[in-house]
Image: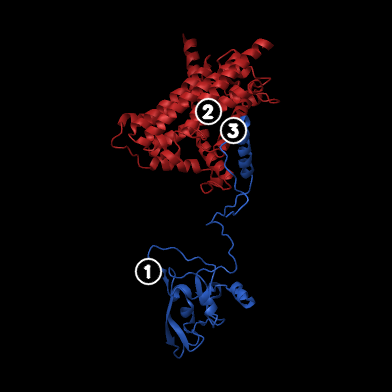
Chain colours: A red, B blue
Amino acid sequence: MTALLLFSLGFIIEKATLILVLFLVTLGVAAYATYGERKIAAFFQDRLGPSNAGPWGLLQPIADGVKMFTKEDFIPNQSERWIYILAPGAFIFVALMASAVIPWGTTLTLGGLNWNLQVADVNIGILYVVGLASLGVYGIMLGGWSSNNKFSLYGAIRASSQMISYELAMGLSLIAIVMLSGSLSLRTIIEQQSDVWNIVYQPLGFILFLTCSLAECNRAPFDMAECETELIGGYHTEYSSMKLGFFLFAEYINMFISCTVISCLYFGGYYFPGLDPNWLGGLMGPIILLSKSFFFIFVFMWIRWTLPRFRYDQLMHLGWKSLIPLAILNMLLTGAGILYFGK
Amino acid sequence: MQLTQRSKNVVNKEMTFMERIYLPAILKGLWTTLKHFFRKSNTVSYPKENRPFAPVYRGWHVLKRDEQGRENCTACGLCAVACPAEAISMVAAEREKGEENLYREEKYAAVYEINMLRCIYCGLCEEACPKEAIFLTDRIVPSDYVRQNFIFGKDMLVEGVEPDKRIDVSKRQKHKTEA
């Protein structure tokens, strides 16, 4: 009984520490993604970007946070008050949950203990991530609807229809990966890429998945939910203070998570040729995965500051008439390949 | 009238396959932005660093003193006559005994005012001045909330007597002699 209790206590402490660290890392990455976005946007436009808060403007995210917290917290008179308050929380909650199933590395040896660098090795991990991605639309929809503002509602409707349309193609391109690895567990999917990354077998699938991730994260060229020039701020037009901060922050968390998922699914997760993820007591794995993730965050920003926004009907045409047929084709090709080569 | 050779005729043709899949165009665009990413920024972080002014920049006027610290201006009024914006006004006065160290000649400007909101910074006052008394400098007129504060009197225009308060206009004088 005592042994069991000790075991479960250790288990709880291990998981709690891991969750806390992961939480802080995710928030930190998201905070500095806002800084990175501004800096990268500036470089793409031959500007300097934030440079006054701290050296190279490195304290800018903190300044932004202070600004967000001290602003007036405005609630529109005619809003659905409780839903209005709940929406940002729901959005950021869903965004933060997804990082639980991502295997950040093999095993970390620290202080004589072995830490499993995955909060929950769910055997349907990727399904869980896709499920949370579709839950993410609730925050936007609730926020947009409860604000009682037509622009917010337009933004929310556009966002939800866009996310639902692109989830189909995303899921279909994922099925090809699942067919290749024969498992829904992210850990297994990564383990099978220790030699050859999935991008070699799935170039079309990768392009489809990347496009759909951009749409899922509501980022340009698919930022239909916000489109500042048309809908003021889209679904968060009526939000201010830290409620707005939560929305913006959750979008960056979503971006970080989807970049990590892309790295896990197509680019070998914590594997890199010539580098062993067990080096530095297992710290090498997270470093490799985070580097890949940061690279994709850069790619996301690069795309955002290059391409103009799609028109709404073009977006729907692309989603339903191009991406979904291509994803089905990709699935069929993968199936044929597996049958023929007997992988 | 054709102004450039860059105009393109818009043709409403069907897109080819390569155009329809967008990817080549997207990659081309990404390459363009990437080139800008590594380009040096043209930004001048203004309060920290200043863009160098042209030697002939025309800003905040100065009323010069000579080497002994006496005001050059004799209140002849030629600058006010030359001024197309009618921004300059002055009141002349006669030099009293004992004031030889203040004013170079027998007549001086007791009041000299330039309305900086009327001024168009053309520099005609400088050209009209026979005494090398007024120059436009590379100093920027500071902003203010009240229109009254933009009427600069002698306190804002005349340079100081001390060597470190003198305003250097050698570049403009050189420009003037060359012209």
| Subunit ID for the residue under disc 1 | B
Where does the C terminus of chain A fall, quadrant-wise?
Answer: top right
SS class, disc 1:
helix
* Residue B148 numbered tag: 1
Q: Nearer the viewer, residue A338 or A51?
A: A338
Q: Looking at the picture, how far across and down is residue A296, in whole percent?
A: 59, 31
Q: Nearer the viewer, residue B99 or A82?
A: A82
| Subunit ID for the residue under disc 3 | B
SS class, disc 2:
helix
* Residue B46 visible, this angle: yes
Q: Residue furthest bottom?
A: B97
Label 1 environment density (alpha carbons within 10 Å; few <14, some 14–19, many ≥20): few
Residue drawn 33% across the image and 39% down it? A74
Disc 2 marks a residue whose amino acid type is Leu
SS class, disc 3:
loop
* Residue B31 numbered tag: none
Q: Nearer the viewer, residue A118 or A171?
A: A171
Mark 3 → mark 1, Cα distance in angstroms? 64 Å
Reading the image, the residue beneath label 2 is A318
Residue drawn 51% across the image and 68% down it? B59
Q: Are marks 3 and 1 in contact (CB under 8 Å)?
A: no
Mark 1 → mark 2, Cα distance in angstroms? 62 Å
Q: Is residue A144 left or right of residue B106?
A: left
